[in-house]
Image: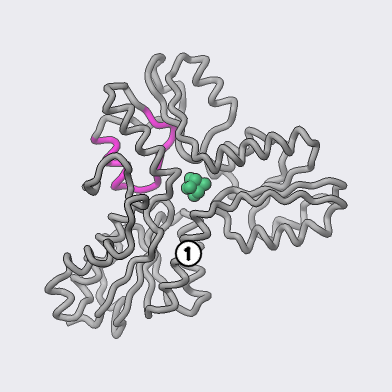
């Protein structure tokens, strides 16, 4: 018999609206009978990628792989203006799934370039969103971790902007650092509110449970940040990619209360599967006997329609 008596899923989790809308656009195009491609995976989640593939939506890494006249979906991270022009020049039907928040970042960057600021971009090198952003400000100084910041030159007029999923604390620290680097500093706060809300809700449940399970890709920066936040709030946290990552009941030894949260590419349906798995392998007798019911109750308490993986189908994707 296990010890887990209660399992809670953080509210305002599930895939973010930007990713959800890009997925919806791909599905709508495909169901209208179009030969549909995505330029890079629209979401970093194996289950969702397999579902799109099953529907006949083909992922490509380069525009050259797409035949003229077919549809190509731009993912929520957005692309450089150059990629958009190339897609149009090749006669592709461009379905722009760029998240509205990211589009706003593109506009802000273009304005800053026009106004002649030395731009500092806080972001993860080679992340697709950052690659797209640099297309709008090719001379921007890209920095990530604090140890890079000393290399930022002193300039008269500087502007700071960020990739959407950077942690708010890091953005604030960099802004404070830049004050000493220039005469005029313009700060455009483009940390996505979805990321902030998810962190708030994760911290809220982390404070109430003995163990947090954080679900998301191993390379996902926003998932790693959730794990870190749980730990700095004093709760042990374990990061996994999916329910398959839970196999050892010893992880839950003597634990009575477990919280679950997930990164912005993790469907809320996956969090339900994780809840069920925990209930099955580590629940008390009563919890094990009703594992599916307990997982569904945890999902229902956390989920609202807008945090579902897709807006166009009420049923889970698998
Ligand atoms: S994290 Fe925010 S900005 Fe990024 S795709 Fe999702 S909703 Fe858009």
**Can residue 39 be found in the magenta stretch?**
yes
Q: Tell me: 243 left or right of 128.
A: left
Asked if residue 36 is positioned above or below residue 6 in the image, the reply reads: above
**Outermost residue, front side:** 305
Q: Where is 252 relative to 125, above or below?
A: below
Taking the magenta stretch, the answer to whether it contains residue 267 is no
**Residue under circle 1?**
226
Q: Position of residue 168 (x, y in %)?
A: 60, 60
Which residue is located at x 50 percent, y 56 percent? 195
Task: Where is residue 241? Give x, y as percent.
Answer: 35, 58
Q: Is residue 254 above or below residue 212?
A: below
Residue 178, image x, y percentages: 78, 56
Q: Nearer the viewer, residue 123 or 314?
A: 314
Q: Quadrant of residue 19?
A: top left
Q: Position of residue 262 (x, y in %)?
A: 39, 60
> In the rendered structure, which segment of residues is drawn in magenta?
37-54
Image quadrant assignment for residue 291: bottom left
Residue in the image at 37% along x and 80% along y = 210
Secondary structure found at label 1: helix
- Seen from the viewer's position, the closer of residues 268 and 145 is 268
Number of numbered discs? 1
Name the residue rendered at 49%, 36% in the picture: 98
Asked which quadrant contains residue 56, the reply is: top left
Mark 1 crowdedness (10 Å alpha carbons): few <14, some 14-19, many ≥20 = many
């Amino acid at each position: 018999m296990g010890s887990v008596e209660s399992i809670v899923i953080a509210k305002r989790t599930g895939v973010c609206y930007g990713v959800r809308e890009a997925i919806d656009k791909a599905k709508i195009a495909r169901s209208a009978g179009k030969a549909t491609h995505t330029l890079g995976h629209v979401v970093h989640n194996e289950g969702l990628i397999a579902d799109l593939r099953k529907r006949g939506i083909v992922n490509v890494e380069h525009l050259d792989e797409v035949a003229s006249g077919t549809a190509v979906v731009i993912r929520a991270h957005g692309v450089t203006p150059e990629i958009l022009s190339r897609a149009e020049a090749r006669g592709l039907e461009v379905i722009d799934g760029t998240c509205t928040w990211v589009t706003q970042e593109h506009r802000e960057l273009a304005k800053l370039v026009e106004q002649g600021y030395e731009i500092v971009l806080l972001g993860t090198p080679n992340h697709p969103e950052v690659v797209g952003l640099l297309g709008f400000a090719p001379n921007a100084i890209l920095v990530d971790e604090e140890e890079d910041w000393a290399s930022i030159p002193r300039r008269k007029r500087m502007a700071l902007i960020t990739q959407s999923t950077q942690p708010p604390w890091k953005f604030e620290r960099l802004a404070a650092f830049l004050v000493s680097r220039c005469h005029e500093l313009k700060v455009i706060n483009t940390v996505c509110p979805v990321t902030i809300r998810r962190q708030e809700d994760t911290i809220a449940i982390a404070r109430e449970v003995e163990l947090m399970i954080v679900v998301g890709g191993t390379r996902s920066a926003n998932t790693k940040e959730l794990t870190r936040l749980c730990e700095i709030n004093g709760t042990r946290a374990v990061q996994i990619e999916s329910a398959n990552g839970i196999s050892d009941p010893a992880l839950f030894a003597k634990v009575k209360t477990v919280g679950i949260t997930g990164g912005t590419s993790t469907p809320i349906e996956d969090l339900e599967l994780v809840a069920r798995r925990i209930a099955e392998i580590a629940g008390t007798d009563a919890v094990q006997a009703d594992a599916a019911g307990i997982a569904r109750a945890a999902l229902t308490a956390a989920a609202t329609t807008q945090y579902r993986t897709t807006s166009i189908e009420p049923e889970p994707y698998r």
